[in-house]
Amino acid sequence: MKINNFSAGPSKIPNEILENISEDIIDYKDLGYSVLELSHRSSVFEELVNISKSKITKILNIPDDFEIIFIQGGATFQNTFIPVNNKSLMNNISFLISGTWGKKTHSDFEIYFGNKISNYNIQDIGYENSLKDISKSDEEYLYLTSNETIEGIQIRDFKNFKNKKLIVDMSSDICSYEFDWSNLSYIYAGAQKNLGIPGVTICIFKKDFHDESTKTSYLDIKNHILKNSSFNTPPTFSIYVLTKVLDWILNSGGIKKIENNNSIRANKLYQFLDENDDYFQLLAPKNLRSNSNIVFEFKEGSKTQKFLNHCVENGFIGLNGHRSVGGIRVSNYNSITDDMIDDFLVLLEDFVK
């Protein structure tokens, strides 16, 4: 049976990348040993790091005044790594909270700094009201999660916050659309949604973002910059896979083509759900619907689990909504194909009938 993997992460890897990886696991670059055995102190691995940095710079059109590092710890580690490297954020940052991950980050920042931090929750006061309030606030920095995987809420237009320096968790939608860098200070993303497998976190930040205060060695961002992401043993295989995925994005037509494909697939699914709104309920506000995670449920609650069981029986996996909200979640990451969405829609339509 053909398996269609819609998991929210770790996500599907394109077949051509898997085939390429399988060869390198046996013999990497005809060196006679596996890529899994590659030393992080070798010139071969340093070349991998530099190639990855070059390719992601090209894909995202990253300006020259930004640094790129690859570290471990996932997005959650950034809740410590960012504040410890920029103490000036204390009393100088506010949060736009659009879902679960933003709430968790806000809570961690409050614990780290030991004080309350301003926040604007769009689920309480709405997005437009949040924009108005944020524009009047005094804080120089603003944190937001560009795509909330659990609620299916996405914020892509960073220019709406032009008077703020943005810190953005892009873990689930990095390299899926173009964006403007003019007011960005720091973005980060775990690789396991659009850029490969778990293990490596991509951090892209202004060269003057960090301060000179004393911190322990792994927490000091300067060490990772100076050692070109090899201050300690990095996740070598995850960085290798990252390079392969970046190649795949470029070979697929680059960021504009990827963004267009993602939008077409998401719109197909949203159109069907809207046309059948007697049966379905979407969790996200219409103006903030995510192209990366389409979250919905049957209005008749018992049908949701029946449909999820039907999906597994027919080879469609990873569609369970997050345990905190339930429902159905279609993760439409870069690697999802048109055929996968079309086949899912046939399955959904047949179930409704």
Image (tube, rainbow, N blue to C red):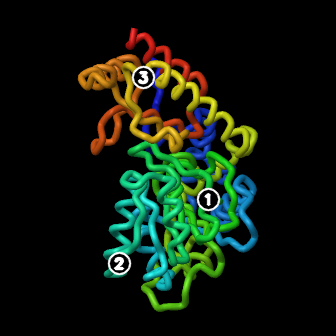
Task: Compute the Cα span from label 2 to label 1.
Answer: 28 Å
Compared with 6, 308 (above or below) is above
Q: Residue under label 3, please give it.
A: 277
Q: Indicate the secondary structure of the residue bearing disc 2.
A: helix
Residue 210 position by quadrant = bottom right
Q: Which residue is mark 1?
A: 160
What residue is shown with label 2?
112
Q: Quadrant of residue 314?
A: top left
Q: Residues within 10 Å of mark 2 (few under 14, many from 20)?
A: some
From the viewer's side, name the closer residue of 131 and 70.
Answer: 131
Horizontal placement of 101 versus 266: left or right?
left
Marks 3 and 2: CB-CB under 8 Å?
Answer: no
* Residue 194 image position (x, y, % from top left): 56, 46
Q: Give amino acid for label 1.
A: Asn
Could you tell which of marks 1 and 3 lies nearer the N-terminus? Answer: 1
Q: Earlier in the sequence, mark 3 or mark 2?
A: 2
